[in-house]
Amino acid sequence: MGRSSEARKPMPAFLPRAALAALSSLAALVLCPMNPVLAGEVVDTHSYANSAEVRSTHLVIDLDVDFSKRSLKGLTEIQFEKLKPDADRIVLDSRALDVRSAEASSDGKTWTTTKFVLGADNAVLGRSLTVSLPAGATRVRIAYATVPEATGLQWLKPAQTAGKQQPFLFSQSQAIHARSWLPLQDSPAVRATYEAHVRVPKGLRAVMSAEMSEQLDSSGRWSFHMPQPIPSYLIALAVGDIAFQSMGPRTGVYAEPATLKAAAYEFAETETTLALCEKLFGPYRWGRYDLLVLPPSFPYGGMENPRLTFVTPTVITGDRRLVSLIAHELAHSWSGNLVTNATWEDFWLNEGFTEYLTFRLIEAQYGKPRADMERVIGVSELKTDMALAMSDEDRKLVRGFPSTDPDEVFSNIPYQRGALFLAWLESRYGRAAFDAFLRSWFDDHAFQSATSPQFVAYLNDKLLKARPGKVSAAQIEAWISQPALPADAVYASSDALTKVDTARDAWLAGSATLDAMGGEAWTVQEWEHFFEGFPNTASSAQLRALDTKFKLTGSSNAIIASHWYKLAIDSGRAGELKLMAPIEAYLGHVGRMKLVSPIYRALIATAAGKAQAKAIYKKVGSGYHPIAQQALERIIEGG
Ligand code: BES
Ligand code: ZN
């Protein structure tokens, strides 16, 4: 599977929709004079939804999970409000859904069949699903089935799980994949509450990003309820042999039984992080905060599904050193889930904020040296991606025009450039004033979606004007809309990481022994830094000595293993060190894009390596998540 760029059609022109939005904004202004998103003025080019006219408010989702067909059979009800009273249709997003019928109702009791039309298929956006609204209709419902290749779902064989006995299914809706398993208005500018009922095979359990029932309901289904309005990309589902262990009053972990104990140990400090987060940024508004550990093919490190963060098992290292990932997903409960980027061009409002908050949380919980280590690593990832970026447009915090596919422009830039921008503002106004500003940003926009211009206007109002002379509008403009990083960015430094540089370079230069390097005591962050500054010119004897001493090949730490394999390939030594078999085993087991993409990218740099990459991908590619398959195919075919 995977969508090749040749097949991609040009973006449809949305001018008529923008014009309609402008017309309807007058009516919407009466509803909410302040927020252009609520007023329907924001144009999300990644959704077909006519949300300026008719906007969904609540979903009732009913799903039958069929592992043998790799399909969800669904009946999804969309309740809506009309911003334009005479609107006679609701436009939804869909991708590769087998739509069987549409019905409408005014009271939720009597339903009548209504007309639906699927628009032309676009490789990125899928198809619009336009449902006619009879007079008085307040809701529609769609009967449909998903296809096995649905981009927002991964169906795992038992062999791909920890327990090896039962299949597993999980969703990944961000950015625009919810539409591949739910017909809905798939835009982050639209929020809705939801309830869901999910029927699964005997012995399996369903979990969702919602309040969850502890047991099957009377009709043999798992039931869920999300009382806070959320954007569609936060709707999430997983089904498998899933057990639960409590970690604290509000926190716990779901995982396969084989993984549960290690996970509960690894993440035991989450309750403390949650309390710190509230102290810094205001009340946690979602009830519980649980984690779900996924099988290793999960394509991301973590996903901030509300109440239930999805997390890769590759952060379970036994030493609790990778919990900044949990801090990050938890922080999204403010930046992202509470205040949401209104379009995918505003992605930094989610991720840049969240990285800034993460560094603050790590600092509060583990001290400044550890936070500064993370900050330095963040900047080095930023520099890598600034160099890799295809164009200046991708180097900006906010692109001047929308991307075709949000997955395609995904990088560390919105994360780390965004975090640097906020750190720079903090340095200008002082921590106390900046914290108060952040907190009021969250409070004033709670359960709303926001755009970058809205943020700039708010910043202008609350800080630039209120405390004149510290920051200029031109500086803000440079941070957001210029490709180059401003020269006065404030960078952290880390003594521990500087020591790693010194030790590595002394060993490589032959002025110190490997024993003197001190690697035994390094944390994963020190190892990451060690590899990031490693030249590609080491001899095979040096690499072999490094591997022998630190047992890098086959390391149970997937982050260290990924760096090591990349280094061996970049140095042209993977063959002579007999690493191709372990590399293939690794690529066949781990599906986290951040760990596997660099290895494929390193391989394709030479003609021989490219052939190896293709051969490995041919063998193991079907085990990757559809989103990872698409990203990896782009690397392998593009390079
Ligand atoms: N929301 C993101 C993951 C994401 C982004 C999924 C865009 C799909 C589209 C999540 O919060 C995230 O940033 N995960 C990072 C972890 C991190 C500690 C920076 C990841 O997966 O690497
Ligand atoms: Zn994030």
Image (cartoon, helix red, strand yellow):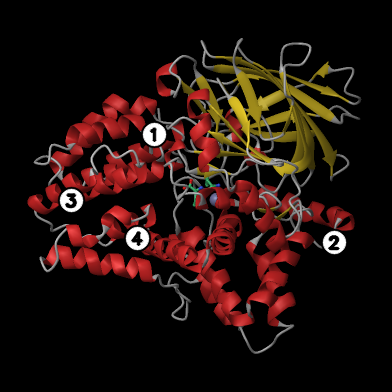
- Upstream in sequence: badge 1 or badge 2: 2
Looking at the image, which is closer to me, 627 or 54? 627
Residue type of the residue flagged with mark 1: Gln
Above or below, comparing residue 247 to residue 486 in the picture: above
Separation of marks 3 and 1 at Cα, in angstroms: 32 Å
Determine crowd level at label 1: few under 14, some 14-19, many 20+ residues with C-alpha closer than 10 A: many
Q: Secondary structure at mark 2?
A: loop
- Upstream in sequence: badge 3 or badge 1: 3
Name the residue tied to disc 3: 546
- Upstream in sequence: badge 3 or badge 4: 4
Residue type of the residue flagged with mark 4: Thr
Foreground mark, 3 or 4, reads 3
**Residue 81 visible in this rendered orientation of the protein:** yes
Residue 347 x, y percent position in the rendering? 57, 55
Q: State the mark number for residue 384.
A: 4
Separation of marks 3 and 4 at Cα, in angstroms: 24 Å
Determine crowd level at label 4: few under 14, some 14-19, many 20+ residues with C-alpha closer than 10 A: some
Residue type of the residue flagged with mark 3: Leu
Residue type of the residue flagged with mark 2: Pro
Q: Secondary structure at mark 4?
A: helix
